[in-house]
Image (spheres, rainbow, N blue to C red):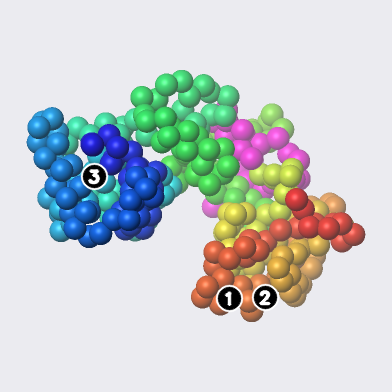
Amino acid sequence: MVIALSSVAAEGYRSGSFWPAWWAATGRRGRPEDARQFGEAFSAALDRLGLPGQDAPNRHLAPILLHAGVPDSCLEGFLRYLLEGRADELDEPVRRLVEHDDDLAGELTERCLDLLERLRSPAQETGDPGLPRRIADQTIALVRADVIDPVPPAERPEITLAPFGGGVRLRPPGSSVVLLDGEQAPVGPNGHILITAPDVSLSMNGQPVSLIDAADPLLIFAEDGHRLPANRALPSDAFWAVFPAGRELTGDPPPRVIADSVCWPGWRLARARAADWWRSPTAACAPGATSRIMTSSAGPPP
């Protein structure tokens, strides 16, 4: 009973809803009374096994979600909370979990942080992190897909743009040592290091720093010069884009380029504005809201 309910909750919980996943897994057409009985049976099983429960307004569901740990749908928000302290992205069951002062929450947090530490270096083996396999596998996948940066924000280099002559710059944290093509980089005003070419070899404290994705060579910056993640929706106001000459900034629909110049030799620096469709409240997560580039004669990338 405990294993079955918590396992289905771990995989099937979505934004406050669990019982539809349970009815689908069991082939039942459950009623609210059935959910109450399953919840009471789960709590009774916990008592007999000497396992902790949880007092919460939804007393029939909260203990199940506690023993589910971090459901699949909540993992990204949980990892951001560990790295960035962003509690606003925690779903309610995970919020209760991290506030639950017992060994379960503490051990899970410690092992997730240990795995994220190992994932900072692409070459390092992750080994056995001592986590449920689903959490370990999904954490690794989120990091390798660049959805989650395993380095805490205070330790990350900041890549910015000074569009009116300053170019693309890197500002390392603290006393970090930055090498450009194997030589220590000169540090300019405000701790900035000028990036002189897109293919420069860049490292910080012995670890490589990725600047350009060869599969999608596009840098997007907000109007104030702060870099925006490539997998996020475009801002509603103007933005800057750096990409190879001979390609066009495109999307569905394409943004409107309002100024064009050169960033690096063979690379364009364009100031653009997202189409009105992207500024609608429902468009932030819509397909196509993330900018892409392609050659003018080619079809959309696969």
Residue identifier under label 1? 279
Task: Work out whether residue 28 or residue 260 is closer to the camera in this orientation and state it.
Answer: 28
Q: Seen in the image, is 302 located left or right of residue 289?
A: right
Q: Name which residue lies at 58% across and 42% down.
A: 145
Q: Mark 1: few, some, or many residues within 10 Å (few <14, many ≥20)?
A: some
Secondary structure at numbered mark 3: helix
Residue 295 drawn at (x, y percent)? 85, 57
Majority secondary structure in the magenta region? loop
* Marks 2 and 1 in Cβ contact (< 8 Å): yes
Residue identifier under label 2? 275
The mark closer to the camera, 2 or 3, is 3
Secondary structure at numbered mark 2: loop
- The answer to which quarter of the image holds residue 70 is top left
Asked whether residue 125 appears in the rendered view, the answer is yes
Seen in the picture, residue 99 relative to 135 is either above or below; the reply is below
Residue 55 drawn at (x, y percent)? 12, 50
Q: Name which residue lies at 76% across and 63% down.
A: 249
Residues rendered magenta in the picture: 185-210
Secondary structure at numbered mark 1: helix
* Marks 3 and 1 in Cβ contact (< 8 Å): no
The mark closer to the camera, 3 or 1, is 3
Residue identifier under label 3? 64
Q: Name which residue lies at 72% across and 49% down.
A: 216
Under mark 3, the amino acid is Ile
User: Number of labelled discs?
Assistant: 3
Mark seen at residue 202: none
